[in-house]
Image: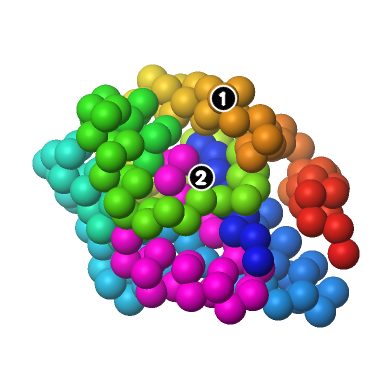
Amino acid sequence: MPLITFEGVEGSGKSTQARLCAERLEAAGRRCVLTREPGGTPIGLKIRQILLDPSNTSLDPVAEWLLYEADRRQHVREVLRPLVSSGALVLCDRYSDATEAYQLAGRGVDADAVRRVDAIARDGLLPDLTLVYDLAPEKGLARALARERNRADRFEAAELSFHEKVRAAYLAIARREPERVTVIPADAPSEAVFERTWEVLSGRFPG
């Protein structure tokens, strides 16, 4: 069954859209599982705490990237591949495209190294469909900070230029892989964004 991933800048609403999709699919009687990166496994939850902790200001960009890859490898082996093989429709909040956007483009980690190691972490598992929720970073950050009551995590606290690089990287991925990636404008109420999300999802996977 398909692996569908949800991507976007901070505050783009991708997590809300993934949850709404899961609820609609379950209501329709479809077997689906909603998971996330980082933090889709017990080990991944511990990694997530390190990655998002705003006090970890000295975390090296390469160390950050390798923590994400460790989380992904565990997630693929423990959760994603078994679920896909069992016939479940899997919805994943962030996956490899996030690493390209945040660590390769945003942090400037070596592109060849990222691609080689990420291929090992993915273990051949690629998304069948990726939805990228596009939003101006300043709007997304304002949303995220309001949601978190002005307590920014490590990424939300980054400079605006970092988030602009992340957005540009997502759009570049979509241009490079239009068969897999669909960009959905996210500057609208969540209900309207979900209508477009469901249109894309049901169009790609009828029934």
Which residue range is magenta in the image?
A: 73-98
Tell me which amino acid carries mark 1: Arg
**The label number, if any, that marks residue 144 in the structure image:** 2
Image position of 127 with respect to 163: above or below = below
Q: Is residue 95 left or right of residue 61?
A: right
* Residue 139: image location, x then y, percent: 58, 31
**The label number, if any, that marks residue 10 in the structure image:** none
Q: Is residue 137 left or right of residue 182?
A: left
Q: Residues within 10 Å of mark 1 (few under 14, many from 20)?
A: few
Q: Is residue 34 left or right of residue 164?
A: right
First-in-chain label (1 vs 2): 2
Which quadrant holds the C terminus? bottom right
Q: Is residue 47 left or right of residue 200?
A: left
Tell me which amino acid carries mark 2: Ala
User: Which secondary structure, mark 2?
Assistant: helix
Q: Is residue 92 magenta?
A: yes
User: Which secondary structure, mark 1?
Assistant: helix
Q: Is residue 143 visible?
A: no
**The label number, if any, that marks residue 176 in the structure image:** 1
Image position of 90 with respect to 136: above or below = below
* Residue 96: image location, x then y, percent: 43, 46
* Residue 14: image location, x then y, percent: 60, 49
* Residue 102: image location, x then y, percent: 37, 35
Residue at 53%, 29% (x, y): give it: 173
**Can you tell which quarter of the image residue 107 is in?**
top left
Which quadrant holds the N terminus? bottom right
Nearer mark to the viewer, of 1 and 2: 1
Residue at 64%, 74% (x, y): give it: 88
Return the residue nearer the eye: 83 or 158.
Answer: 83
Dominant secondary structure (helix, strand or loop) of the stretch shown in magenta? helix
Q: Is residue 189 magenta?
A: no
